[in-house]
Image (cartoon, rainbow, N blue to C red):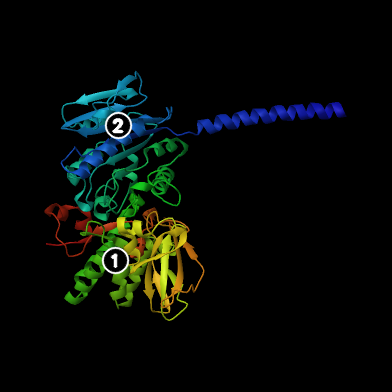
Amino acid sequence: MVMKTMLLLKKLNKLLLILLCLVSVSVNATETKWDVAIVFRGDAQSGPDDEQMQKDIDENILELARLPSRGNLRIGIYRELNGKSFTYLPYANGQKEISLGDILYRQDLNQIIIPGIIKKNSAPQLNSFLKSFYKDADSKKALVIYSHGKGAEGLRGISNQDLKESLSLLPHLDLLWFDACFMGNMEFLYELRSVSDYTISSEEAEFTSGLPFQSLGLLTSTSSGREAAVLLANNFIESYSYLKNGQQRNYVSVSSATISVVENKKLDVLAKSLGVVSKLTKELTSEQKNKLNKTLLNKASMDDKSLIDLGTLLIELRKIVTNQNLNAQLTKLIRLMNIESIKSLKTNPRIHIQNPEVESKLVYGFNNWKDGASVDVEENEVFDSIIAHEGYLLGPNRKDWPFKTIRSKKIIIAPFAPGINVFNYYFLNSKNGKLLTEALSFARTHDVVESFADSASTPLIYSAYTQQVGTKAERYTGLNITMPGSVPSLDYFELEFNQLAQWLSL
């Protein structure tokens, strides 16, 4: 009996080993092939911003070149520089040790040796590069375009129509990522909706550091464009997070980082629905229009004031409308954009502090009394933008800390900003300086707000942003749109979205 049991266990162990091997083979076999083209547009222009952009492109190319070789991930890099263009294929067949000197802006990096193949062109050859890159019919296909962007006006140096024609010559893409400012724009996304299944973009100004390119190595573990898009977008937003210690967090200084994933085939419903909003805004009285525009400029404008957050527009417009039928239509549209879900997921950066006396002095600092002392306040205006101080008092760590006289029973402040995640404070009697409370603190739990689609009909399947200070932490709902009543370039009136929704008129 014992012998039979041992033999049975031996057979079971052997069977388990076989099963484990099969599972291992299955896991490896489920890796998906991806062809990813990365286009770095924006030739070097004059000015410090463009110079920094070129340096960041250098860093991004080096990051891509150092990605571990993966059999199921094929990468092609295209760059425009000094009137020329360069194609770089890391880990390509026939690769050799090459210098990246020609493809890099910084000449002090020209000694770096990287494996791959480089092709030099005497002029921009974007269409030629894209047509020749996507060859494998069985691979998932992604395209990343890094450039200057301006919402409905598209990418700098190439018209929307030319870009649309160029991309329409490619095989249909699973994923398209515009790594450029303001390209989470309703008008632009609608124009390019047929090019790919999913589009990733930012509604606000972007940082020239761009996306964390090493995250492209995660693609082979995804089997669909939707899964890949959400994974990459989430990785992007976390790379700019202070509290999650993202690798690119130091780039965040004034503006928040924003990201959205749009399922393009569902944009038609949203575009048609916005025709109602267009008609409604045009029927407002002059007084209502002025009031709405003033509110939008204050609460909803992007760094480019001609663009506003679409969700905030809908919410503010609903406050004006008294007609129940129109109010219901706006509510339906707000839900279609998934805005209610985003609102419920916010962590409010404002805090309420009770004043222990009728009049007292609030002494305060930040990050566990490490930041915000007199020397910090004088060097960085962000501290005074949170609370305007009246002077300094000697306090924790033998440093001089700012104070403000409080004469109300309650104070409401927004004490958090990028890199400022803990607010420390105590109260003193304003006359004799007697300590009224012990040192207290508030900590921000996280600085990333995320929203996943909770409806099958919404085109916004994922949106996220890093929190900033005050009302700016609450204005991002996923897409921007041109300010109603403005007059952009004449090309705008030829866009398909404007033809459909009549958003603007001459």
SS under mark 1: helix
Q: Does residue 453 lie above or below 169 as drawn?
A: below
Find the residue positioned furthest to the right.
Answer: 1
The quarter of the rendered structure image containing the C terminus is bottom left
Question: For the point 37% across and 38% down, which residue is it?
Answer: 213
Mark 1, Cα crowd under 10 Å, few <14 / some 14-19 / many 20+, is some
**Above or below for 482 versus 221:** below
Q: Nearer the viewer, mark 1 or mark 2?
A: 1
Q: Residue 206: image x %, image y %?
A: 29, 49
> Of residues 424 and 223, which is closer to you in this image?
424
Give left or right: position of 437 versus 138: right
| Residue matched to label 2 | 77
Residue type at mark 1 is: Lys
Residue 497 percent location from the top left of the image: 23, 55
> Where is residue 236 drawn, in percent x and y?
39, 46
Q: Is residue 429 left or right of 309 when viewed as pictured?
A: right
Disc 2 residue type?
Ile
| Disc on the earlier residue, 1 or 2 | 2
Structural distance between the alpha carbons of marks 1 and 2: 39 Å
Residue position marked by numbered label 1 in the rendering: 299
- 400 relative position to 104: left or right: right
Residue 107 at x, y = what percent?
24, 29
Q: Residue at x 32, y 58 (%)?
A: 269
